[in-house]
Image (spheres, helix red, strand yellow):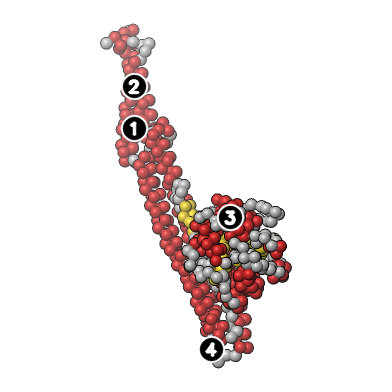
Amino acid sequence: MSEIFNVRHNISAMFAHRQATLNNGTLTKALERLSSGYRINRASDDAAGLAVSEKLRTQVRGYQVAARNIQDGQSMVQTAESALQTVHDILQRMRELAVQAANGVYSDSDRSLIQLEVDQLINELDRMSTSVEFNEKKILGPKNTKADIVFGIDTGSAVTTPALAGLQASLTTLTDALKKANIDFRLSLVTVGDGSVPEDTRKVLDFTNNITAFQAALNAVAVDFDFSPGYNAIANLFNVYTPFVGTMNGGIPSYASDAKRFLLYAPENDDPVGTEIDNLASGAPPGPPNTNANGEAAARNILLDPNVDGKTDDTVTTYVLTNDLVPGTIAAYDALVVDNDLGVINSNQSVAAYQTDIMPKIAQDIIDKAGDREDPISIQASANKNGLIMLDLPADVRAGNLHVYDVSVLTQAKAESAIGKIDDGINRVSRMRAKLGAQSNRLDHAYQFALVAAEGMQSAESRIRDTDMAAEMIEFTKAQVLSQAANAMLAQANLRPQNVLTLLG
């Protein structure tokens, strides 16, 4: 009770002031939350909640960007699909012209006029393949149109003669096809034997673009008659020609880093060689005692291992030109022909067969592989790592890859044949467009998921961070009433010490 007469410390006023300060602080926080819309405006408001909220914000913003990425991918796919529609139109027009030229009422001179338009359409296919872009990024043309081609000739036996004669006679069939398909190629030649006779001296012709010089070198290859076991020649070929295994030897240059690699290999084909090749393919110990172990390893690496030097793109497509063995009689031959759909080629045929059948098939296979697109375009479709969608855009719509680079309607028979070739090209483009359509549908689903994920994350983040306006308004009203009451009581508490004056008279 003595507190009533204490004038040095106004305890009642101090209490009222403290309560007014607390109420004003509560009122200030309520005003801040109501005006900002956030329950958490600083870490001190809710430290754990702030940490979780920021993590959710990261996901939300990431998925929002991922959704835009997916839309960009959709636009790229749609651009490619539109270009393929034009390719389809070109091929359909070419087919119309081929059907027209196949009509017997036309003369060959009439067909030559039709051929003029066919040639222009073929040129347009090649132009489109290299000119269609999205954001300055080529989306149809191949990244890799270079081919390094080695002719490996084992001169150890006369039975190589059919294959060698076929290669010599049909070289221009190969080179003309590659030129027409716009493949940038180089040729190289290696001849090997076991060294038992003077004619077996190794010959190497470095990579060259001079077709005339290469043809002269190929025609100069002679076949001796030593009939020695051919396994050692196989080993020597790969031991000598070390660019196949990614090294340098004897000044022979390595392949161009961005070129696809091909080997046309004409081995010695007497019966023992069949067993030796089979052993090489199966990994069994070699038969002949004079086999070069290093060469054997190199041969096995390049013929059987598509991952030479740890590079998955280092595969060499090998065309083994057999002579006296029927393909399929030695199962290991399938393994010897790495990444090659043609299988082992039975070369015991006429020169005409090389020109009309064997070499055109090899040429088309080289065109297809040299035109393969690498490194598909990736779309970051998630807020987090490992969220890529790989877009497999069309490999190549050049005339060579569509198998229509050599379409001719100059005669009725050629026009009939052209119809089939163009049908094949149309089917190829249809498959490309179907693949693009499937990828477009996938992107649609990915886009919807990104939106749903962002929406869900945003909802969770909102519950943690945003202000509950109704609840906060109740808190604000309560704080406002208490603040006004505290201020009124503070005024009353300040009046109480004046009662002491009544004691002073």
Q: Which mark is nearer the camera, 2 or 4?
A: 4
Can you say which quadrant of the picture contains the C terminus?
Answer: top left
Q: Mark 3–mark 4 contact, CB under 8 Å?
A: no
User: Which image quarter: residue 490?
Assistant: top left
User: Which image quarter: residue 100?
Assistant: bottom right
| Residue located farthest toward the top when viewing the structure as drawn | 504
Q: Is residue 349 visible?
A: yes
Type of residue at label 2? Ala
Q: Which residue is mark 3?
A: 289
How far separated are the C-alphas under marks 2 and 1? 15 Å
Q: Residue at x 41, y 31 (%)?
A: 44
Q: Mark 1–mark 4 contact, CB under 8 Å?
A: no
Q: Nearer the viewer, residue 285 or 348?
A: 285
Q: Residue at x 47, y 69 (%)?
A: 431
Q: Residue at x 40, y 56 (%)?
A: 448
Question: In terms of sequence position, does the residue under pointer 3 or pointer 4 come before the other?
Answer: 4
Question: In terms of sequence position, does the residue under pointer 1 or pointer 3 come before the other?
Answer: 3
**Vertical arrangement, residue 459 with respect to residue 479, above or below:** below
Badge 1 element:
helix
Q: Which residue is mark 1?
A: 480
Question: In terms of sequence position, does the residue under pointer 2 or pointer 4 come before the other?
Answer: 2
Q: Which mark is nearer the camera, 3 or 4?
A: 3
Instruction: Say the numbered circle drawn on residue 16.
Output: 2
Q: Nearer the viewer, residue 365 or 53?
A: 365
How far separated are the C-alphas under marks 1 and 4? 97 Å
Q: Which residue is mark 4?
A: 103
**Vertical arrangement, residue 479 with respect to residue 444, above or below:** above
